[in-house]
Image: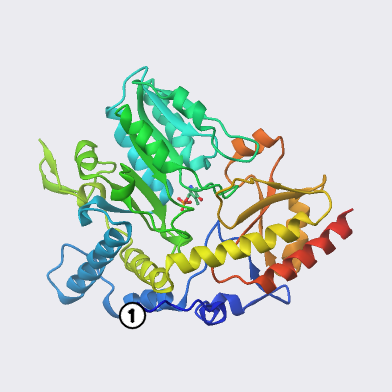
Amino acid sequence: MLQSVFDVNTIRKDFPILERKVNGKSLIYFDNAATSQTPKQVIEVIVDYYSNYNANIHRGVHALSQEATDAYERARTKIQKHFNAKHAYEIIFTSGTTHGINLIANGFSSLLKKGDEIIVSALEHHSNIVPWQMLCERTGAILKVIPMSEEGELVLSEYDALLSTNTKLVFVNHISNALGTINPIQYIIDKAHGLGAAVLVDGAQSCPHIRPDVQDLDVDFYVCSAHKICGPTGVGMLYGKEEWLKKLPPYQGGGEMIAEVSFEKTTYADLPHKFEAGTPNVCGGIAFGAAIDYMNAIGFDAIANYENELLVYATKQLEQIENLKIYGTAKNKTSVISFNVGSIHPYDIGTILDKMGIAVRTGHHCAQPIMDFYKIPGTIRASFMFYNTKEEIDTFIASLKKAIMMLS
Ligand SMILES: *Cc1c(COP(=O)(O)O)cnc(C)c1O
């Protein structure tokens, strides 16, 4: 088989935004964990949709509606194949990870009773904490938390101790957005299944870097957002095992999700439409499929190898800087580096870097419990994708040193 040759300079030509200047400097975009950039192959699909076959789907007999429906359903099948789901109808289009999590949390309202237990991890994004707190308030279920270590890894012996026959659900992210830790989800899934609990994995940070196989993992639910894997905002997917999706009630009522409606009784549509009320983000779904094609054409092994090189390269240089502390030093991590320098406020460094054209994120990264653990208000987070370069990292390090001089 021909190995695809990974050439970052060729890849960068696919991303028009990387050409632009910010504050007079060439943009260096290191905020990929918040949202990734969009290649022209995906932008062209969006332009083509609105230029040529924009229509509402599933209901029309006319040509445009047929074309849009076919393209949307082809995208669903692409996503199914990518994640190796057994059936295309196990892929539900959502508006993103947050929507997918809320859909499941809402569905479990009718399945949980007082005293049931839900386990989440200390490494979660707010979107993976708040919906469960709301679910517990509605049902009387109890929320338990798998603690983390100083390195930013989950303490699995504590997880084992939390599990019991009362555990009904376990929620964990595959990769932490704040620290980059890759969590041992196979272990977490197997243990939970041993006690009959279901597992939802938040794949928002993993899908840009690795290709999960939902059947191999035997995961019950898996969610992600297209905008973190080179697709547009406002669309994502929820994978659910057929048996679970059949058991859960619909999330929203409306058009598309019904079989028959009368004022006495409404029967729901089959999967996946039962969970897709209203006109979906048709263009977004099609572009999501194009983003997956784009990433697969480069290849996830090549992506992971190259991003790991960037991670190692940047980490080594950051470690040389006096008073700089990296948070999250897990053995297994992706290309996310969270750090602080002495007592300098992360926001001040972020502001100066922006003046130099460098986009990083500062703050709590929607993961305040992690910041509380380290007793810090926030961090500076640099997160890399396969279109970033070592030269950009060199510029970033030099600019960071300048910023530190200015602020000390
Ligand atoms: C970005 C992110 C989310 C939220 O994704 P949305 O697209 O904002 O819904 C949830 N979890 C993790 C780990 C994330 O990185």
Residue density around tag 1, few if under 14, some if 14–19, many if 20 or more, within 10 Å: few
Circle 1: residue type: Ser
Residue 192 location (% of width, % of height): 36, 32
Image point (73%, 77%), residue name: 24
The N terminus lies in which quarter of the figure?
bottom left
Q: Secondary structure at mark 1?
A: helix
Asked if residue 231 can be seen in this view, the reply is no
Image point (55%, 30%), residue name: 147
Image point (87%, 55%), residue name: 407
| Left or right: where 174 falls relative to 290 | right
User: Vertical placement of 370 versus 174: above or below?
Assistant: above
User: Vertical placement of 42 versus 317: above or below?
Assistant: below
| Left or right: where 46 falls relative to 173 | left
| Left or right: where 351 falls relative to 92 | right
Residue 180 location (% of width, % of height): 57, 50
Q: Cβ of disc 1 within 8 Å of ligand 1?
A: no
Q: Identify the residue at the far top of this view.
A: 115
Residue 259 location (% of width, % of height): 11, 48
Residue 373 location (% of width, % of height): 65, 33
Q: How is the image coloured?
A: rainbow
Q: In the picture, residue 226 is in which quadrant?
A: bottom left
Q: Identify the residue at the far front of this view.
A: 1
Give 106 or 385, whichever is nearer the viewer.
Answer: 385
Give 124 or 255, whichever is nearer the viewer.
Answer: 124
Q: In the picture, residue 63 is in which quadrant?
A: bottom left
User: Vertical placement of 193 versus 403: above or below?
Assistant: above
Asked if residue 52 can be seen in this view, the reply is yes
User: Vertical placement of 128 versus 310: above or below?
Assistant: above
Give 392 or 276, whichever is nearer the viewer.
Answer: 392
Image point (54%, 32%), residue name: 155
Residue annotated with mark 1? 51
